[in-house]
Amino acid sequence: MRQGMPHRQLYPSVNGLVMNKPNLNRDLALRIGLAARSLPDIQTKLFMTVLTECTGLPLTEESVDSLDKARFNAIFKQHGREFNKAVLDNALSILKTVQPEEIAATDQPVYQDGEMPGSIRIAIGSQDGFHVDGHFSSCLQFMIYQISTSEIRPIDIRPIQMDDARKYSDKNEYRADLIADCQILHIASIGGAAAAKIVKKGVHLIKIGNHKTIASVLEQLQHILVESPPPWLAKVMGIEGTQRFRFEKQEPVL
């Protein structure tokens, strides 16, 4: 430091947030940045303004975890922004260290192994929970579905947990392990090294157009299961070899 220059304590920034220790740790700063990005057309600065108006200062894990969804939504409305319930719930699920009960709740019955004979498990990389969007290495979550010829059932949402990811020397290995129980991954984009890890886990990789709705992807896949599953998919579904014979000479659909 040159003589006469004032001393400044510099802290690292995450997604544009300068962390003021000890009040804003790295994990909290990262979650705030990711939650802000999950809301359409919202700058991190506005997100921070709304957040601090809801919780007060300093921002801590405890104050963020106790954030009230109704107040959060009301403060956004005061700033001229409004979001539907699903989008807001997704932002809160990213922001909080524990999912609020209202976010975790679902109208769907809990899936038990073996309940849907002939079904397959699908992972879909998504930012907002409604579209296939984002890159494999940076998407916020994987939506998990069990699908058969007669039923589509959502069974899990697997957000990226930074504490768990740090246990891996390779973040793509962590993400691959998150979906290792699935037969298919639908993703908007993925690099070659990450794709190799997915294939090594026995997961069939399908890259599709960015921002295609999850509902349309599931509907199309179910139609394929009913009408003309390619041999590899018929095998996963447990269809006997003699029954798979009629698919052997068809062009792959997936």
Image: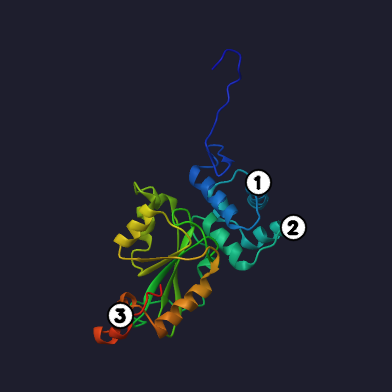
Q: Position of residue 120 (x, y in %)?
A: 37, 76
Q: Secondary structure at mark 3?
A: loop
Q: Is residue 22 above or below residue 251?
A: above
Q: Which mark is residue 105?
A: none
Relative to residue 59, is residue 187 drawn left or right? left
Q: Which mark is residue 80?
A: 2
Image depth: mark 3 or mark 2 in front? 3
User: The residue under label 3 is which amino acid type?
Assistant: Glu
User: The residue under label 1 is which amino acid type?
Assistant: Lys
Tag 3 residue? 248
Extreme left residue here? 241
Mark 1: few/some/many CA within 10 Å (<14, 14-19, 20+): few
Extreme top residue here? 3
- Pointer 1 with pointer 3, Cβ within 8 A: no
Tag 1 residue? 45
Q: Position of residue 111 (x, y in %)?
A: 40, 76
Residue drawn at x 41%, y 85% as measured from the top left: 227
Q: Position of residue 199 (x, y in %)?
A: 32, 62
Image depth: mark 1 or mark 3 in front? 3
Q: Secondary structure at mark 2?
A: loop
**Residue 130 in view:** no
Mark 3: few/some/many CA within 10 Å (<14, 14-19, 20+): few
**Depth order, front residue of 195/15:** 195
Q: If you read the primary sequence from the N terminus, does the residue marked by circle 1 or circle 3 appear first?
A: 1
Q: If you read the primary sequence from the N terminus, does the residue marked by circle 3 or circle 2 appear first?
A: 2
- Pointer 3 with pointer 2, Cβ within 8 A: no
The quadrant of the picture occupied by the C terminus is bottom left
Q: If you read the primary sequence from the N terminus, does the residue marked by circle 2 or circle 1 appear first?
A: 1
- Pointer 2 with pointer 1, Cβ within 8 A: no
